Image: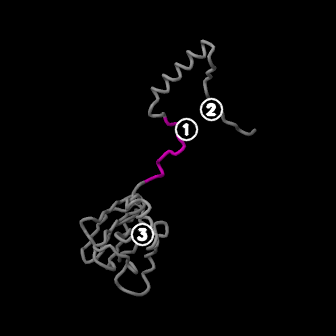
């Protein structure tokens, strides 16, 4: 008998995120049908334990525009909705959802926040961008106009030699407590 992996979900007006937490997943199979039928199966662990999900989503989906990504610890699905509208729940069946299905509060936004975001960013989608790799300090970055800076520095050094100013080499100092 198959087990059910922990599954998180969140939505926007036009898409649903489904994140399946299953480290070292192998033989991943995924089926999504236009009527909203979602099927997932994979094995995990040294014993190749089978895992499976099979449920009906709340409404119809656009299979062609939906995407999947298999990572080391999670399998992420971006399911495009057929109609741009908010669903009252993930599953078609009413009542309490299964224990393995949870809301992904890290991705969750309210319906009114989604409209504000579209107005604020002009409808551009930044959800899939990874900002964690951007270096915002700039301390070790070489400026784009490094050649121009070198020419300016040479001119300043020549001016300093003529007695017109002072140029010193800059260095970074660090302090450490004994």
Residue 129 visible in rendering: yes
Whether residue 131 appears in magenta in the rendering, the answer is yes
Whether residue 125 appears in magenta in the rendering, the answer is no
Q: Which residue is mark 3?
A: 115
Q: Residue furthest top?
A: 162
Looking at marks 1 and 2 on the same chain, the residue that comes earlier in the sequence is marked by 1
Could you tell whether 116 is left or right of 16 in the image? right
Tell me the element at label 2: loop
Task: Return the mark for residue 87.
Answer: none
Marks 1 and 2 close (CB-CB < 8 Å): yes
Residue 50 visible in rendering: no
Alpha carbon of mark 1 to alpha carbon of mark 2: how far?
A: 10 Å
Q: Which residue is mark 1?
A: 139
Whether 121 is drawn above or below 104: the answer is above
Tell me the element at label 1: loop
Task: Return the mark for residue 172.
Answer: 2
């Amino acid at each position: 008998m198959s087990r059910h992996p922990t599954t998180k979900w969140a939505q926007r007006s036009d898409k649903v995120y489904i994140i399946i937490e299953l480290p070292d997943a192998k033989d991943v199979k995924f089926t999504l049908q236009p009527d909203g039928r979602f099927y997932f199966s994979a094995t995990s662990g040294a014993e190749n334990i089978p895992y499976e999900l099979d449920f009906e989503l709340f409404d119809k989906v656009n299979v062609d525009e939906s995407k999947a990504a298999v990572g080391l610890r999670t399998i992420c699905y971006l399911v495009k909705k057929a109609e741009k509208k908010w669903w009252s729940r993930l599953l078609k069946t009413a009542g309490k959802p299964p224990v393995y299905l949870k809301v992904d509060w890290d991705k969750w936004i309210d319906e009114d926040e989604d409209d504000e975001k579209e107005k604020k960013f002009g409808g551009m989608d930044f959800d899939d961008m990874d900002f964690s790799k951007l270096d915002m300090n700039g301390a070790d970055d070489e400026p784009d106009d490094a050649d121009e800076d070198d020419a300016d520095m040479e001119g300043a050094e020549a001016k300093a030699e003529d007695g017109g100013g002072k140029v010193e080499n800059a260095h970074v100092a660090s302090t450490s407590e004994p």
